[in-house]
Image: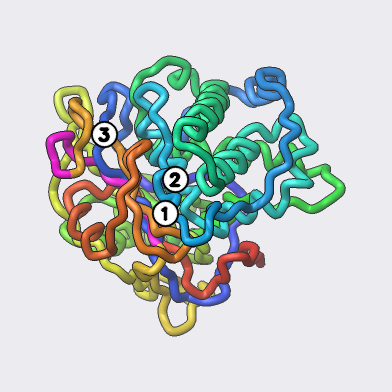
């Protein structure tokens, strides 16, 4: 199944070299009845539900700016964690991965004057407040209370568009990431009429694929374009191989417009490349009417090269790469693994490259540990679930490039 996310606003990076900020999900405590095998878009309520969102929360008048850690030479790493407010490790990991993308956060903070005037910008406000709460000084207890309040608001925002988030049940982190991106796009749509132009941070992850559908009977080719914000890959021994498999020609049953043929071969190529490439690894298979987790290891490269799957029209020079200099990783590992800290079947954590340039961080809800790239790549081989590869040619403060 392709990972189609029909959204607009794909963009092109200025270079083809990509640095992997890979966001990995570790330790997933998942309600298997709700976790998806290969969810391509979040399940949402009708647009009318979005219209009710401004009425659920009071307007925040807080003006936020980009914060730095308080204290000369002081390490406030412990403040970067997010408290679990009730089986919310899936949400914490998803948020940490997005907050770990500096350009994504800057897109939000730099446009605060634009979105803060809209009562519907609740999730944008939550991202800005979480960013500040994680990086500004203060006591751990005081920050915990502040972050719990923000996280409760995030969860209520998500429950407006997906009622599964109304209770304390575990959800799938992949679905949560997509739902966060979906709602940020919805809030961006509400800002279209703003006096100042607004660039949605989700543009950082959007790209286009070109499709070639060839009738196996008469050879007629039908061309098309599809908009995406991530790819869902089958699990194999190597991430590069999984990516190659995704773009390998596949058979499709369809009616030819020219002849009576009923089968076609479908091929896809990148038409444009995103600044942030999100890759979802399918670690769940359907078994006994419920998804079952697959712990097979996968080799994760520190640098990802894309030319083999880029079409001739994709703006790629010298090869598109994603290097380990900027990747965030979410893992889905058993609770009894070395990373496991909770007594339950599974639990989500994230590994994020510290934007302050001080190495890697392992974020397990409120617990934060420093680590390194080699350890991350080795420890997540059997658990990596979502990876974020970031274009190395883009400045951290730059806006996403447009057509």
Q: What element carries label 2?
A: helix
- Main SS of residues in magenta: strand
Residue 150 location, x and y as percent?
55, 30
State which region is magenta: 327-338
Residue 127 location, x and y as percent?
58, 41
Write the residue at 39% across / 75% down.
Answer: 307
Q: Quadrant of the C terminus?
A: bottom right
Write the residue at 76% across / 41% down.
Answer: 191
Q: Which of 189 and 196 is in front in this view?
A: 196
Q: Which of marks 1 and 3 is nearer the N terminus?
A: 1
Residue to which mark 1 is pinned: 278
268 relative to 30 in the view: left or right: right
**Tags 2 and 1 in contact by the CB under 8 Å rule?**
no
Q: Which of 197 and 26 is in front in this view?
A: 26
As drawn, 137 above or below 122? below
Is 97 included in the stretch rendered in magenta? no
Q: In which quarter of the image is residue 130?
A: top right
Q: Which of 349 and 121 is in front in this view?
A: 349
Decide: few, some or many residues near mark 3? Use Cα within 10 Å; few <14, some 14-19, many ≥20.
many
Residue to which mark 3 is pinned: 347
Q: Is mark 3 on a helix, strand or loop?
A: strand
Q: How far apart are marks 1 and 3 (CA)?
A: 21 Å
Residue 285 location, x and y as percent?
20, 36
Nearer the observer: mark 2 or 3; the answer is 2
Residue 96 location, x and y as percent?
44, 45
Q: Which of marks 2 and 3 is nearer the N terminus?
A: 2
Residue 187 seen anywhere in this rendered image of the structure: yes
Nearer the observer: mark 1 or 3; the answer is 3
């Amino acid at each position: 199944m392709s990972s189609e996310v029909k959204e607009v606003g794909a963009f092109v990076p200025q270079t083809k070299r990509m640095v992997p900020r890979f966001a990995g999900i570790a330790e997933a405590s998942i309600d298997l009845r709700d976790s998806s095998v290969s969810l391509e878009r979040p399940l949402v309520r009708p647009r009318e539900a979005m219209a009710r969102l401004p009425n659920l929360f009071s307007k925040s008048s807080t003006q936020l700016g980009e914060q730095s850690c308080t204290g000369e030479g002081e390490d406030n790493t412990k403040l970067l964690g997010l408290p679990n407010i009730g089986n919310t490790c899936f949400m914490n990991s998803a948020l940490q991965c997005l907050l770990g993308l500096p350009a994504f956060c800057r897109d939000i903070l730099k446009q605060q004057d634009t979105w803060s005037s809209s009562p519907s910008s609740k999730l944008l406000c939550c991202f800005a407040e979480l960013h500040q709460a994680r990086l500004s000084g203060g006591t751990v207890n005081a920050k915990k209370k502040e972050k719990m309040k923000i996280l409760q608001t995030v969860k209520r925002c998500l429950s407006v568009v997906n009622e599964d988030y109304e209770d304390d049940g575990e959800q799938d982190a992949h679905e949560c990431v997509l739902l966060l991106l979906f709602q940020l796009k919805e809030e961006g749509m509400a800002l279209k009429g703003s006096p100042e132009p607004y660039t949605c941070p989700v543009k950082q992850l959007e790209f286009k694929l070109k499709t070639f559908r060839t009738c196996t009977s008469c050879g007629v080719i039908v061309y098309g374009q599809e908009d995406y914000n991530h790819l869902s890959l089958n699990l194999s021994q190597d991430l590069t191989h999984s990516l190659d498999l995704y773009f390998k020609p596949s058979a499709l049953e369809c009616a030819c417009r020219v002849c009576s043929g009923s089968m076609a071969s479908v091929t896809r190529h990148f038409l444009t490349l995103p600044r942030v490439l999100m890759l979802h690894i399918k670690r769940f298979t359907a078994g006994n009417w419920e998804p079952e987790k697959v712990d097979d290891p996968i080799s994760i490269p520190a640098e990802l090269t894309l030319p083999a799957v880029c079409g001739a029209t994709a703006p790629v020079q010298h090869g598109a790469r994603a290097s380990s200099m900027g990747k965030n990783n979410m893992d889905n590992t058993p609770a009894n693994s070395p990373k496991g800290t909770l007594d339950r079947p599974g639990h989500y954590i994230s590994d994020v490259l510290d934007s302050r340039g001080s190495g890697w961080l392992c974020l397990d809800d409120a617990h934060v540990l420093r680590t390194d790239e080699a350890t991350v790549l080795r420890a997540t081989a059997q658990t990596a679930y979502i990876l974020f590869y970031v274009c190395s040619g883009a400045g951290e403060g730059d806006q996403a490039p447009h057509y």
